[in-house]
Structures are given as structure tokens and as C-alpha cells.
Amino acid sequence: MPFKVSHMLSGALVFLAFSGIATSAASASGPFWHVGGKKFESGTRQIKLQSKGAIVLKSTVIEIECKNSISEGATIEGSTTTQGQGKGRISYSSCTVLKPTPGCDIAQPIIMTPLNFHLVETGTQTHYALLLEPAEGVVFVVLKFSGTCTIKEWAVTGSIAAEVIPTKVESQDGLITFPTTPITKVKLEGTEKAVKLETVGIAFTISAAYGARLATFPEKFGVFET
């Protein structure tokens, strides 16, 4: 009996050790940030986003067009065991309410709540995306209206994903694009995750393109599988 118990315990320990290795290997799957020719494993780099062209925020009942948008305090973070991380906020200015009625105004700048960034896998052509979600709670941004608007404040909740271009190569300048047809599913740390913004139960979208570069420009960076 002692031999059998000892043998069983040894087998259990081997199983747990193997499971730990397997879990560690699974959690270490990319995509990851690369900076300066190698995998970015520790520390942070400030990343600056600047909109290219108009930004459109809309649902079936409201549409807002902004001419300018930038990141605020945005960083990417080094990692070895989790997909690439980051954090920051995005603000919008020079905005006009196109719908529902003339004379409806919106408070500016529009500033997102503090966000967490995650590099994720996606089924789009670029294969990788940047997931943005609230650092705390579910509120993504609060829209405040005045003038002829019948609703004075709307909270937009949920998350959004942007395509990252290019991938598997480092460059001084990148492109982060929130497509007109939103990305609705991503894979984060091996688990499929639904992605959606909404306000008062109605789907809400943001369409925009941003140029991206590190504050340490011309240092190169990129997104890679390993």
C-alpha cells in the first residue's frame, strides 16, 4: 500500500508539473510588441496616436463627426507571458453633431475613460488587432449634449478593436484602424471574446484611422507572433 500511494503521488506530481508547463506555454502565445529589433519584454514606451482624416461616432439615432483625435498618456508595455499590453486614453475635438437635428451640440473635447490595451488575434486580413476596453467598469466614454438635443448625456459601454498595420515587421510609423464594419470577435489569451460598443441598448460604432509612432521616434516597433 505505501508503494502504491507513493507511486500515485509521484504520478500526480508529474502530471501537475506537466500541466504547469503546458499552461505556461499556452499563456505565452502572442501577439507581442517588438521594439528596436527584439521582443519587448519589460518596461514601457509612450506611444502617440494622431488621427488621419475624419472620425465618425454613430448609432442609428446619432452621428458625430470629429476632425481631430489624439492619444493621451498612452503606453505599450513589455510582456513575456501575456499578449502585448498597454493603456491610455483617446480624445476627440472639432466635433459636429450630424444627427439627429440641427442645433444639437456636444461638449468637447470628448475624452474616453482610462483604457486598457491588449494585442489580440482576429479573423481579419491583418490577423492581429488592438483591443481597447475600460480599465474599470464598463463605461467607454460619456457623451454630453446641449442645445436642441433631447438627451443630455449618453454613456457608451463595452469595448472596441482596431486593426494593426503592418504586422510581422518593425517600422517607425504604424497604422491603427477602427473599421467601418466593426470587429466583433477576438481571441485574447486563447479565449474568444465578444467585442461591442453600445449606448442605451443600441449598437454604437467608431470609425477612424490613426498614425502611430513611439515617443522615442525614430525607434522602430511592430507586432509579431512570437
Image (spheres, grey):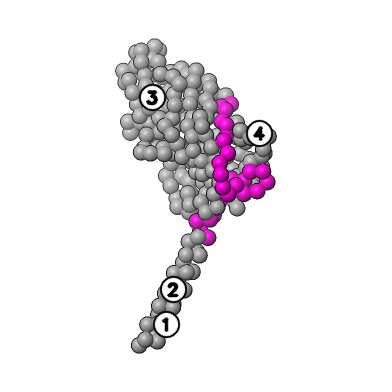
Residue drawn at point x = 48 percent, y = 61 percent: 23
Vertical position of residue 176 compared to residue 9: above or below: above
Disc 2 vs disc 3: Cβ atoms closer than 8 Å? no
Residue designated by label 1: 7
Residue at (46% x, 40% y) in the render = 116
Q: Name the residue under label 2.
A: 13
Q: Which numbered disc, 1 or 3, marks the residue closer to the eye?
A: 1
Element at label 4? loop
- Secondary structure category for the residue under label 3: strand
Q: Is mark 1 on a helix, strand or loop?
A: helix
Mark earlier in primary sequence (1, 4): 1
Local crowd size for mark 4, using a 10 Å CA cut-off: few (<14), some (14–19), many (≥20) = few
Q: Which of marks 4 and 3 is in front?
A: 4
> Three-letter amino acid code at disc 3?
Leu
Instruction: Check whether the beta carbons of the residues at disc 1 and disc 3 lie within 8 A of each other.
Output: no
Q: In the rendered structure, does residue 29 fall within the stretch colored magenta?
A: yes
Q: Distance between the residues labelled 1 and 3?
A: 64 Å
Q: Are the residues flagged by discs 4 and 3 in contact, CB closer than 8 Å?
A: no
Q: Nearer the viewer, residue 143 or 60?
A: 143
What segment is highlighted magenta in the picture? 25-52
206 up-or-down from 45: above or below: above
Horizontal and vertical percent position of residue 200: 32, 31
Disc ID at residue 217: 4
Q: The residue under label 1 is which amino acid type?
A: His
- Do residues under tags 1 and 4 come within 8 Å of each other at their CB atoms? no
Q: Mark 3 points at which residue?
A: 143
Looking at the image, which residue is at 47% across and 19% down?
95
Query: What crowding class fits label 1: few (fewer than 14 Cα within 10 Å), some (14-19), or many (20 or more)?
Result: few
Q: Where is residue 224 in the image (x, y as percent from the top left)?
A: 61, 48
State how far apart marks 4 and 2 are (Cα).
49 Å
